[in-house]
Image (cartoon, helix red, strand yellow):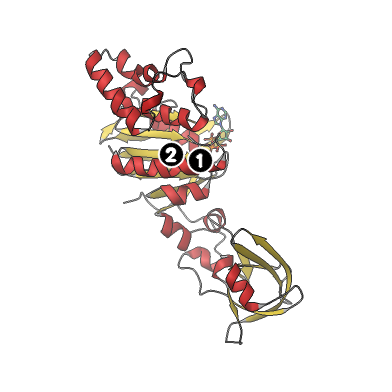
Amino acid sequence: MSIELSKISKSFGGFHALSEVDLSIPTGRLTALLGPSGGGKTTLLRIIAGLEQPDSGTVEIDGREATDLPVQKRNVGFVFQHYAAFKHLSVRRNVAFGLEIRRRPKAEIDKRVDELLELVRLGEFGHRKPAQLSGGQRQRMALARALAIEPGVLLLDEPFGALDAKVRKELRDWLRRLHDEVPVTTVFVTHDQEEALEVADTIVVINNGRIEQIGTPDELYDSPATEFVLNFLGPVTSIAGRSVRPHDIEVLTAPVPGAVEGTLRRITRVGFEVRWEVDLSTQEAPVLVTLTRRQAADFEAEVGSRVLLLPPPPLDGPAGDRAEAHVPATAGAS
Ligand SMILES: Nc1ncnc2c1ncn2[C@@H]1O[C@H](COP(=O)(O)OP(=O)(O)OP(=O)(O)O)[C@@H](O)[C@H]1O
């Protein structure tokens, strides 16, 4: 099912949480709503779900006007960060819940719940209570429960937000594979750019109640439309009056046109990466450069060494020219 939002605005008191948001979410895609805290992601998700009414604008789901449709009639499933399971019910019964209240035949429910528990790899845990599961297992149970009613749209609000980094990473790989197996139109909210870049087909960057840019992970990373997107999607450093990614700066052994010389001020090793801070005479802030450990070792540079840096060619997007202005939202993803 596709989702079409037109000119959605929402204020709380005098505060504009969303301002005239236009967004097309195509069928079967995994779309991330990405942005900083307070940007309006959750509000947009709640409006799609029908948990919140927009002040103005329209919501269409599957080509049908849905702005005033109650939650139960939208055919959406959702999972929130802190998933509220029924504590006294087994995992099986939690997953079966939506089907039981719809009074489906018992044999059908049993079969469907077996399939779902397999799908989320909780086949052996059906008899346990939610409290006897790990945090990651509980979120997988929540997903199984949301999928039980065969929703046309799956809405996930920071579903892995409360979990530790390693489990988050596992679950996001798992979500990507699950989505490839069961391609339900899925919209998930995250403030974690790595999560969005890794998992999503399409990323919608939301800031201050507006869409900054819509695109594939590669488009956003390589051609950010605004300074905000450039900064939000990865590390950025300034060199020769331009904002660039630290790993795109080349370290040279012989001068070429466009190269700049500086003094190595600091060297930090973080895992497989080596970070240099290089002072230039032409700017106050040091230039950040990231290299692999092997590259860094090849240069045999130490604090105080003179190094030659070559900035990358300008980025394709307007942000490459240091566009400070708010570029209007790119129209809906095609
Ligand atoms: N029910 C409400 N009453 C008043 N203000 C609200 C309400 N819901 C949201 N807001 C405000 O609207 C803005 C957008 O909130 P929203 O939860 O959509 O942001 P978000 O991008 O999802 O942020 P986070 O990542 O922190 O959840 C915030 O400033 C928030 O304080």
Nearer to us: label 1 or label 2:
1
Which residue position is annotated with label 2?
188
| Image height of 331 relative to 102, above or below | below
| Crowd around label 2: few <14 · some 14–19 · many ≥20 (10 Å) | many
Name the quarter where the N terminus is drawn. top left
Which residue is nearer to you in this view: 160 or 40?
Answer: 160
| Image height of 261 relative to 197, above or below | below
Which residue is nearer to you in this view: 52 or 239?
Answer: 239
SS for callout 2: strand
Q: Which corner quadrant of the figure contains ligand 1?
A: top right
User: Going by the image, does 119 lie left or right of 314?
Assistant: left
Looking at the picture, which amino acid does disc 2 mark?
Phe
Looking at the picture, which amino acid does disc 1 mark?
Arg
Percent position of residue 59, x then y: 35, 34
Farthest right residue in view = 304
Which residue is nearer to you in this view: 165 or 306?
Answer: 165
Percent position of residue 100, x then y: 31, 14
Which residue position is annotated with label 1?
168
User: Going by the image, does 159 lie left or right of 290?
Assistant: left
Q: Quadrant of residue 165?
A: top right
Disc number for residue 136: none
Q: Quadrant of residue 264?
A: bottom right
Which residue is nearer to you in this view: 215 or 297?
Answer: 297
User: Going by the image, does 185 lie left or right of 203?
Assistant: left
CB at mark 2 closer than 8 A to ligand 1? no
SS for callout 1: helix
User: Going by the image, does 214 lie left or right of 82?
Assistant: left
| Crowd around label 1: few <14 · some 14–19 · many ≥20 (10 Å) | some
Percent position of residue 298, x then y: 61, 77
